[in-house]
Image (cartoon, helix red, strand yellow):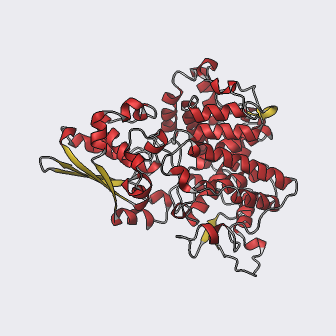
Amino acid sequence: MKSYPIKIQQPGQKLHKEEQLAWRIASMASQDWNLTSAISEMVGNRIIDNAGVAVAAINREAVKIARSQAMQFQNDNGATLFGLDLNKKFDCQWAAWANAVAVRELDFHDNIMAKETCHPGDCIPTILAVAQQKNCDGEDLIKAIATSYETQLRLSMSIALNPNRIDHVGHLGPAITSALGKLLKLDTETIYQAIQWSAHTSIFTRQGRKGQLSSWKAYAPGLIGKNAIDAIDRAIRGDTSPSPVWEGDYGIIPILVKKDNKDLNIELPEKDEPRAGILGTFTKEHSAGYHGNSIIDLAFNVRKKIKDLKQVKKVNIYSKEYTHVVMGSGSNDKEKYSPLASRETLDHSAMYIFAVALEDGEWHHEKSYSDERKNRKTTIELWNKIETFESEKWNKKYYDEPDPIKKAQGAEVEILLYNGEKIVDQLEFANAHPSGKTPFKRPEYIKKMKPLFKDIIDSKEEARFLNLIENLAKLNSNEVKQLNITCDKNKINFEKNSIKGIF
């Protein structure tokens, strides 16, 4: 790894191209390197993970709408859509859109924890769609996906977006674009121009994740993927971009992300160094915001110590600032305590998540958010007894640790009972985390996938898909075109296709 300073251009000064962040990322993306078995296996794990959560969401509203749009753009040389026959192909830009929405909808796949948190697996649908349309092989695909993870991890370790109320997809656009450059073996200059376009069109406010949430957070990665494809296409045709997009005196950093971003630098792998950033990321065992995964596991642990939940008088959850402000009572969002709130709001409510996990001792991506479940009287009573607090101890465990994989993102819970008894417990890492009780490896990814495929994917189709994953690095371009999953056509709801929109 080599560390590079990120210099802000002063008015009237010129920042040489070779010193710009976009150029450094583009240079990293254009270089070749040798695959390792660990990187290949982890890329395969994340493709499995994406397929499971996408299939589980196949008939949710946002996914149905995005799919119905994509199906208007058939292309015999294009890419596949989750659930549909593999012989049906669609323009890669629209396949990326629909498949990314399906992956993101349930908030159930992987994460990065650094100065910025994000979901790096959001990159895979776009990269795979372009790989299918452009006849790329398995090794090309793995290196491209690893490049995207590398870019997003390094940006997330360097530049904080959330404290500035900018959405984390601001790093996803440049990450995907760097990966498409790697996939198509483009030169540094072309990737550089595309990355700046993509960075410029990937900045959105955090309002999409606060207050009354909609399906925006599901659509966001698909839109970013479409923009990335568009940016690469224009750059290949010779177009240029706003420069320097990050460091310019009117650029992203000095104008939009001033908070927590002083004395910036970025570490990037050198030349033939493997792009192993994906190994510093991890997935979710439970369908909820990642900061809630350790809270769910903590609830499972502590419920064994409570004989009667009716005796609970108050629950105090102590964690880092991010958990308190984004998922906790520190957000000051009344919706996080409301049974009328959307699933998208409740999967980012630490209070709701803890209450349900404490009562049920299990978590389900649908049942735990059902209307019946969130309106249960005992749950509402317990839910409103829960409050979160920012803790300096947990801030230090998270913010003072530079290594993303070692950042403790858990919490401590204090449960006060009516009889005066106090129950205290804590958990630093979710069980599925690499430092957790049961860290995920290939068998755990498959174990997570199987119930999500239940009654939708038959056993032969599942076996075919997993066999491709086992041989991912050796797949030829025709086999990459088969790297998707087909549902029983009677299990997919096409009701949105009957609505005539613009397309």
Q: x, y percentage for residue 132?
A: 76, 37
Q: In this view, does 351 lie above or below 152?
A: above
Residue drawn at point x = 48 percent, y = 37 percent: 444
Q: In this view, does 387 lie to the left or right of 111?
A: left
Q: In this view, does 87 lie above or below 46?
A: above
Residue at the limit of the structure toward the left, as seen here = 419
Residue at the limit of the structure toward the top, as seen here = 490
Q: x, y percentage for residue 34?
A: 70, 53
* Residue 49 seen from this side: yes
Q: Nearer the viewer, residue 22 or 417?
A: 417
- Image quadrant containing the N terminus: bottom right
Residue at the limit of the structure toward the bottom, as seen here = 12
Q: Is residue 369 left or right of residue 490?
A: left
Q: How many labels does the image show?
A: 0
Residue at the limit of the structure toward the right, as seen here = 238
Q: x, y percentage for residue 276?
A: 61, 55
Q: x, y percentage for residue 398?
A: 42, 62
* Residue 40 seen from this side: no
- Image quadrant containing the C terminus: top right
Q: Is residue 416 above or below residue 478?
A: below
Q: Is residue 202 above or below residue 19?
A: above
